[in-house]
Amino acid sequence: MRTTIYHNPACSNSRGALGLIREAGIEPDIIEYLKTPPDRATLAKLIADAGLTVRGAMREKEPMYRELALDDPTLADDALLDAMLAHPVLINRPFVVTGRGTRLCRPPELALEILPPRPQNA
């Protein structure tokens, strides 16, 4: 089963999720999204598949969030997506995608919900 993590190596949650995936015996496709951001359709799909709102997928603690006045509750999803695409640091992390689903893995243990079960003798 293909596993992908949208990863930021500087983020402890992202490193934790990657560690859990590897502990499960899986070497995932790693997309360092700050270097290779997702396109609009991919980002929107990640958010929807994880069961989140666009605002729920944003890093509200990021200083740029306030600088760009993204805390304005009247902003539409399109405006929030535009900001995330222009400034990938605003995308919360890590997103993990497997054949069993998509999760924003905060905390990292949420990745375990969508990893394949380990064989009994592993």
Image (spheres, rainbow, N blue to C red):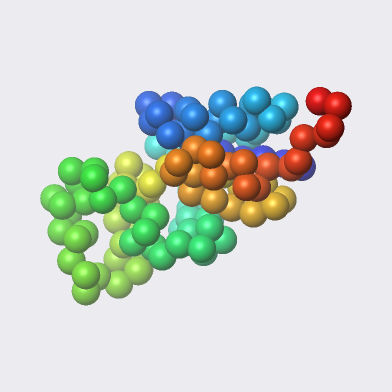
Residue shown at the point (43%, 27%) measured from the top left: 9
Taking depth in this image into account, of 37 and 99 the one nearest to the observer is 99
Quadrant of the image containing the N terminus: top right
The percent coordinates of residue 45 (x first, y second) are 54, 61
The percent coordinates of residue 29 (x first, y second) are 63, 34
Q: Is 78 left or right of 122, judged from the image as shown? A: left
Q: How many marks?
A: 0
Q: Is 103 left or right of 55, judged from the image as shown? A: right
Question: Which quadrant of the figure has residue 88?
Answer: top left
Quadrant of the image containing the C terminus: top right
Residue shown at the point (43%, 34%) measured from the top left: 13
Taking depth in this image into account, of 61 and 82 the one nearest to the observer is 61
As drawn, the residue found furthest toward the front would be 120
Vertically, is 5 above or below 77?
Answer: above
Residue shown at the point (30%, 66%) measured from the top left: 79
Q: Is 115 left or right of 84, judged from the image as shown? A: right
Taking depth in this image into account, of 90 and 94 the one nearest to the observer is 94
The percent coordinates of residue 62 (x first, y second) are 24, 43
Q: Is residue 94 visible?
A: no
Vertically, is 81 above or below 26?
Answer: below
Q: Is residue 72 visible?
A: yes
Q: Is 105 left or right of 63, judged from the image as shown? A: right
Vertically, is 65 above or below 13?
Answer: below
As drawn, the residue found furthest toward the right would be 121
Question: Which quadrant of the figure has residue 111?
Answer: top right
Residue shown at the point (19%, 61%) measured from the top left: 71
